[in-house]
Amino acid sequence: MDRKRKLEMVNRLQLRWQRWEMTNYDYLMQLNTLAGRTFNDLNQYPVFPWVLADYTSASLDLNAAASYRDLSKPVGALNEKRRLEFQDRFESLKDDPEIPPFHYGSHYSSAGTVLFYLIRMEPFTAMNRHFQGGRFDHADRLFSNVAATWDNCLHSSSDVKELTPEFYHQPEFLLNSNGFELGTQQTGVELGDVVLPPWAHNSPDEFIRVQREALESDYVSEHLHEWVDLIFGFKQRGKEAQEACNVFYYLTYEGAVNLDQIEDPTQLKAVEEQIRNFGQTPSQLIKRRHVKRGPPPPPSTRPFLNAPSAMELVTVGQPNAKRPNIGIACLEVTEGRVVLINADRAVSCHRWVSLRTDAGAFTFTSALPEMTYAVEAEATPPRMLGTPFAADLESRNCFAILAGGRTTVCCGYWDNTIRCYNTDEGRLLQSLRQHKDIVTCVAAGTDSQTIVSGSRDTTLVIWDAVPPPKGGRSKQKGGPSLVLRERPRHVLYGHSDAVVCLAVCTELDLVVSASQDGSLLFHTLLEGRYVRMLQLPERAPPQLLVVAPSPGILLAHDWKNLAIHAYTINGRHLATAECKERLSAFAVSADGRFLLTGGVKGVITLRWLHSLQVVHRYDEGHGPITALAVTPEDCILAGCHNGCMLVFAPRTSVMHIKFNLGSAPASAESGANVAMSTPIDIDAQL
């Protein structure tokens, strides 16, 4: 990539980060990539900062500045006494005619640093052995204790290493899950899992969660640009680097030596070995002072986190009088549209109206003259999707929404087909038969290009969603509908009983399927490769599955034990919570912190996703909850057994809206257009 294009990308990233349009983690990963850092090269592995400074306390206050490291200084300058020693070294080397002066002989990121941290996880374990001549280093020199490592980075004259990204997203590297014999320390302690700070409560998952929360905290957001200046910016080289005590051995810098001009093979090999062993400084991306991040969004933009009790019922969508008590089976918000499908296959589309997108940021004040959030009902009647489903099927698993709500994929038909419908018209676009028995469930990936179906024939089929063939009648206002490629991407085997539910996560390249015998199988989406299997307690068959991509957690609910179970995507059990009711709906918040559940009791429960602890309950007395959706603004849409749709939003207005969800559904034969009806009345009640 040429320098000009790279600078343009850096400027765009800075602007997005400054506006809080991307997280600190994502911003650092993008900078690492542009600076030439990659997971495929130990010598140029992505580098992340130490952000916390307290690894000994029993509890941690992420709102206190004392909990954090000074991000304006490199690791070697955090300890004032040691900084003076490094400064003296720099001054003493100024007279050397061949080697430019430097503060540090070691580097904050090198192959040795990466292998030190990741020694318990393959392939780094094998690489570590190779690096040490076929065996592990002495146990006292291996990574065994987070607090001790931090203390060494503060006081040792030869240790100034930063962290790797795994400290913010992957708890497995802290566990000796493979049972490697890492040796015994001089104190007699046999090395196993990494010893964690007291505030992590001996849980690697809690440690990673707190680390990530700290990285995204207001304090780090306010000071992260100072660390970027040191690693990727104007304090990386020159006078500014000298003043910041941030100069490393000259061979670590890009362009410091031209290897093509070294003719002596022995000298060339020696220089290459020095570069490989000392580490490499990232490419300098920014040559002027990094912009500071803008003020954080108001607390009202994250109501689940800051004020869950401020959520209240603001909208009630009433079912048509001619179609009472027909439950809502599927509810999804996508690209400003609300797609609602009833249990009788009647589909309707509405518009999601939010003040955040239409009139800027909102606040919790109740003085606003107009309603903050609403669902604007469509004027056309619901459309009926195909023929009735086979008996004994859970209709909530028979629908998947694609392409901004313009394509609905259905299953559950007696002829073993999977069908695509135009959501706005109810028109059949495609009918495919791949399974040998009734298709029991279907799920869509967030990329709107991946569909997975499961069947009573025990197989899974991964489909690609593509634009229709030229000349097809699928184009419409707002964008085209999609259809499925007739030849599936993969057919997956492994279950010995009927598949009952699915969870698809394209971000993690993962599909999790559950069968009637209680088996949960993990497969990759791109290659169709089997990963692992797990089972719920007592081999209970799950009724609900969802994968939260950001924390990488699988949630499962079964009706046998009436419990919710949380697992990592690597199969480790995290938590179990009794819910004492049959749940019918899961939804994960946009930031991946919270889980919403709804069931026969008619109560919507907000839980911490990592621990399943209850945060708040919302009960408006509209009967059993059958479907849930969460908007990007953390508003809740709930479908009820009686056909009502409820909208919960922050307490921003005293206005409550009731409206009719539509008249009786109009059926549509294949290829037939649906006639437009007269606009429905919207009954506003203050």
Image: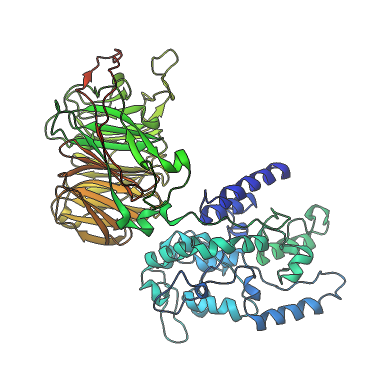
Q: How is the image coloured?
A: rainbow
State the quadrant of the C terminus: top left
Apparent side of residue 156 relative to residue 600 in the rendered image (left or right):
right
Rendered position, 580 above or below 131: above
Seen as rendered, the residue at the extreme bottom is: 187
Could one spot residue 218 in this view of the protein?
A: yes
Could one spot residue 458 in this view of the protein?
A: no
Residue at image coords 69%, 46%: 7
- Residue sitting nearer the eye, 341 or 516: 341
Residue 126 in the image: state x and y as whole percent: 50, 62
Apparent side of residue 363 relative to residue 267 in the rendered image (left or right):
left
Residue at image coords 60%, 54%: 32
Quarter holding residue 415 = top left
Marks counted in the figure total 0
Rendered position, 608 above or below 343: below
State the quadrant of the N terminus: top right
Apparent side of residue 546 relative to residue 142 in the rendered image (left or right):
left
- Residue sitting nearer the eye, 591 or 565: 591
Residue 610 in the image: state x and y as whole percent: 33, 60
Residue 233 in the image: state x and y as whole percent: 69, 58
Residue 467 in the image: state x and y as whole percent: 43, 23
Quarter holding residue 73 = bottom right
Rendered position, 342 above or below 2: above
Rendered position, 386 above or below 319: above
